[in-house]
């Protein structure tokens, strides 16, 4: 059974800013985007995973910015349609996947993918937020929220974050957040990104209070960049960063004077990436990260070219339910 979850019709205001007098190029792009966003259904339905009474288990997780902007403005070096179809097929082996920039090729992304539960695309640029969550476990609901603050070209789409509550067993649910924060390091972008993280933190305080959470996505932020507030975000919510725990000896990177970010495709297991996986335990549900991996070979074509302009980040996570406190809380946030 294949279930594509629709985005909430009453989701928060998009808050993206249209500038009057859009050029003919943008108008053509909008028409192209609308057409490409139709019919996002898989051709290969996967079997429904029966829920069990398990009190422990293991999850394979992935976050990936798939560079789904229209080819004419994409910075990825490979042909977008076939590359994104390949990505969709390759991610099928992971239990829960968060994708960012799933804009204009969602039909291709889902075409060969076999996850039984997937959020439905809001559409291409400028209609969609580019956030998709794919899961082998039931998604009880999804809530999408656009940023209140943005900068530059990021204001042309309703970028933001989403919450998907995922049911792992009959008695265990997990709040999974997908995020794509404002890009660039100019003063306007940095100010907007700080407010982005403050906005999602306030939402998590309200909607996921006392709940276990998983936050995977493109933060466009570094601990090493003194102007970013990602370490404040992490501390405020009591989050653990899987890369810090597994690859950096549990230590947050120091601020670097005159920090210059490396290209997203140059990251490796032992350097900080803007694509991050955070988690938060509760007294009842404990998660233990096991293996962190920058996935390069898996998402390269036959010529060795990357399928996106980011590297995918994977994590294996063990979990254990210590008591019955993490019970299902219904299908609304």
Image: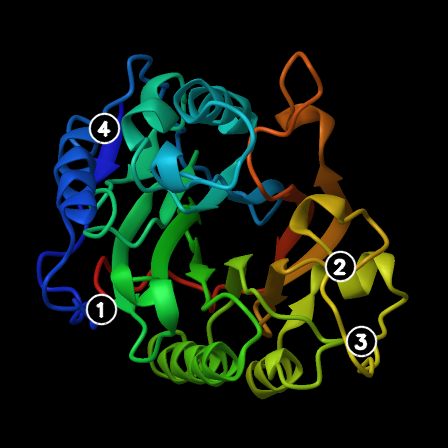
Q: Are marks 2 and 1 in contact (CB under 8 Å)?
A: no
The residue where tag 1 is placed is 16
Q: Residue at x 86, y 54 (%)?
A: 270
Circle 3 packing at 10 Å, graded few (<14), some (14-19), many (20+), is: some
Percent position of residue 163, x then y: 35, 61
For the residues labelled 2 and 1, the Cα–Cα distance comes to 32 Å
Disc with the residue nearer the chain's start (3 vs 2): 2
Disc number placed over residue 40 in the picture, else none: 4
Q: Estimate the x, y position of residue 125 in percent, counting from the top left.
A: 25, 47
Q: Quadrant of the N terminus?
A: top left
Give the crowd class for mark 4: few <14, some 14-19, many >=20 residues within 10 Å: many
Q: Are marks 3 and 1 in contact (CB under 8 Å)?
A: no
Alpha carbons under labels 4 and 3: distance apart = 40 Å
The answer to whether 195 appears left or right of 12 in the picture is right
Where disc 3 sits, the SS reads loop
Secondary structure under the numbered disc 2 in the rendered image: helix
Q: Residue 43 appears at what percent x and percent y?
A: 29, 13
Q: Nearer the viewer, residue 77 or 88?
A: 77
Name the residue carrying label 3. 252
The CA span between labels 4 and 2 is 33 Å
Image quarter in which the C terminus is found: bottom left
Q: Please tell me how crowded label 2 is: few (under 14), some (14-19), or many (20+) other residues with Cα within 10 Å.
A: many
The tag earlier along the polypeptide, 4 or 3, is 4
Q: Can you tell which of label 3 and label 1 is closer to the viewer?
A: 1
The label shown at residue 235 is none
Can you say whether 51 is above or below 326 in the image?
A: above
* CB within 8 Å, label 4 to label 3: no
């Amino acid at each position: 059974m294949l279930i594509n979850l629709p985005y909430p019709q009453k989701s928060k205001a998009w808050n993206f800013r249209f500038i009057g007098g859009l050029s003919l190029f943008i108008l053509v792009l909008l028409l192209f985007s609308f057409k490409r966003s139709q019919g996002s259904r898989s051709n290969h339905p996967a079997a429904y995973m029966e829920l069990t009474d398990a009190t422990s288990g293991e999850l394979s997780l992935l976050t990936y910015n798939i560079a789904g902007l229209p080819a004419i403005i994409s910075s990825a070096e490979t042909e977008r349609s076939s590359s994104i179809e390949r990505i969709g097929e390759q991610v099928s082996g992971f239990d829960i996947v968060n994708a960012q920039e799933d804009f204009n090729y969602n039909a291709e992304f889902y075409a060969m993918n076999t996850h039984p539960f997937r959020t439905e695309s809001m559409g291409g640029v400028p209609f969609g937020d580019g956030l998709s969550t794919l899961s082998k476990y039931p998604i009880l609901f999804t809530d999408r929220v656009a940023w209140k603050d943005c900068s530059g070209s990021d204001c042309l789409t309703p970028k933001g974050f989403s919450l998907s509550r995922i049911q792992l067993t009959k008695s265990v649910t997990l709040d999974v957040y997908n995020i794509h924060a404002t890009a660039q390091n100019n003063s306007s972008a940095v100010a907007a990104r700080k407010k982005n993280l403050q906005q999602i933190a306030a939402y998590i305080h309200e909607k996921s209070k006392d709940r276990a959470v998983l936050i995977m996505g493109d933060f466009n932020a570094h601990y090493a960049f003194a102007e970013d507030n990602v370490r404040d975000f992490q501390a405020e919510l009591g989050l653990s960063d899987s890369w810090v725990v597994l690859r950096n000896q549990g230590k947050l990177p120091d601020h670097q004077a005159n920090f210059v970010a490396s290209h997203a495709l140059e990251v490796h297991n032992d350097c900080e990436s803007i694509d991050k996986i955070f988690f938060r335990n509760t007294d009842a549900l404990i998660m233990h990260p096991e293996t962190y991996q920058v996935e390069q070979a898996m998402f390269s074509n036959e010529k060795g070219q990357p399928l996106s302009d980011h590297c995918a980040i994977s994590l294996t996570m063990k979990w254990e339910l210590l008591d019955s406190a993490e019970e299902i809380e219904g299908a609304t946030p």
